[in-house]
């Protein structure tokens, strides 16, 4: 596997790891930092399609041989491993378990996209924000960090784009969640006041 690592890349905050429309030949695994992925519509509008953190993969289009559908921009100074997909594919021919893992990576990404469409289509702005915050909490906890206190690397505009609401709606939703004593967001600092109640709030529409 070490031979497949093309290089370790350091990407400064705001810089692009890759751009939409460029050839996809590598898988990228985030060692440090975080990224957002952006899709540019024909009208020129940009939509945030996801946020990736450490130990996650980017550039899964390489598995299908397609060009990058989105651009990936660093939300903070980050470091990624660039792995040649053609080399990985050759290795997978001798290691069926590796091919199965690659298929699972792609399958999880498809399920994530489907879940996002279903979620954002059936919930209010307040509920969407609560689900987003809870998702971040679980991701931080899985990496050994606090599930109750963390810092947002993305802007409120990015969050609004991702959950499909207007930027001004985010401010109202933050106020509403604070009044419900579920979540307090000051600047980019997040405090989950009652995690169990937040989980129950997010589950009430399922």
Image (cartoon, rainbow, N blue to C red):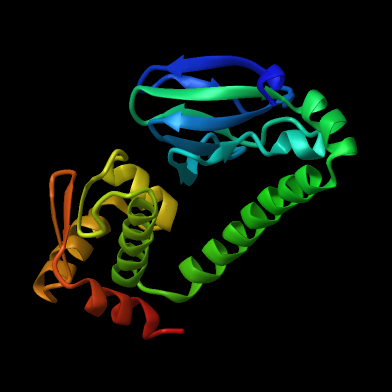
Residue 22 in which image quadrant: top right
Residue in the image at 17% along x and 71% along y: 182
Q: Position of residue 66 (x, y in %)?
A: 78, 34
In the rendered view, would you say 196 is above or below 113? below
Q: Position of residue 75 (x, y in %)?
A: 36, 31
Can I make out residue 45 in this image? no
Compared across the picture, whether 90 is left or right of 42 comes to right
Q: Position of residue 47 (x, y in %)?
A: 49, 43
Residue 99 in which image quadrant: top right
Task: Give the position of the N terminus as an image quadrant.
Answer: top right
Q: Position of residue 154 (x, y in %)?
A: 32, 40
In the rendered view, would you say 42 is above or below 182? above
Residue 76 in which image quadrant: top left
Q: Closest to the observer: 79 or 24?
A: 79
Residue in the image at 62% along x and 63% along y: 114
Q: How many marks?
A: 0
Residue in the image at 14% along x and 76% along y: 180
């Amino acid at each position: 596997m070490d031979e497949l690592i093309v290089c370790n890349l350091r990407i400064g905050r705001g810089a692009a790891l890759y751009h939409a429309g460029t050839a996809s030949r590598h898988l990228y695994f985030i060692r440090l930092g975080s990224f957002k992925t952006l899709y540019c519509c024909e009208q020129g509008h940009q939509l945030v399609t996801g946020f990736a953190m450490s130990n996650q993969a980017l550039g899964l289009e390489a598995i299908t041989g397609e060009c990058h559908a989105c651009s990936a921009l660093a939300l903070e100074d980050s470091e990624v491993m660039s792995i040649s997909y053609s080399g990985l594919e050759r290795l997978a021919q001798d290691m069926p378990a590796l091919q199965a893992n690659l298929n699972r990576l792609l399958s999880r990404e498809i399920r994530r996209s489907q879940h996002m469409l279903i979620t954002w289509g059936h919930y209010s702005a307040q509920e969407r924000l609560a689900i987003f915050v809870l998702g971040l909490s679980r991701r931080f906890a899985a990496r050994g960090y606090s599930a109750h206190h963390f810092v947002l690397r993305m802007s409120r505009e990015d969050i609004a784009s991702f959950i499909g609401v207007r930027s001004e709606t985010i401010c109202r939703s933050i106020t509403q969640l604070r009044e419900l004593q579920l979540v307090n967001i000051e600047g980019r600092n997040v405090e989950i006041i009652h995690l169990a109640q937040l989980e129950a709030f997010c589950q009430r529409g399922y």
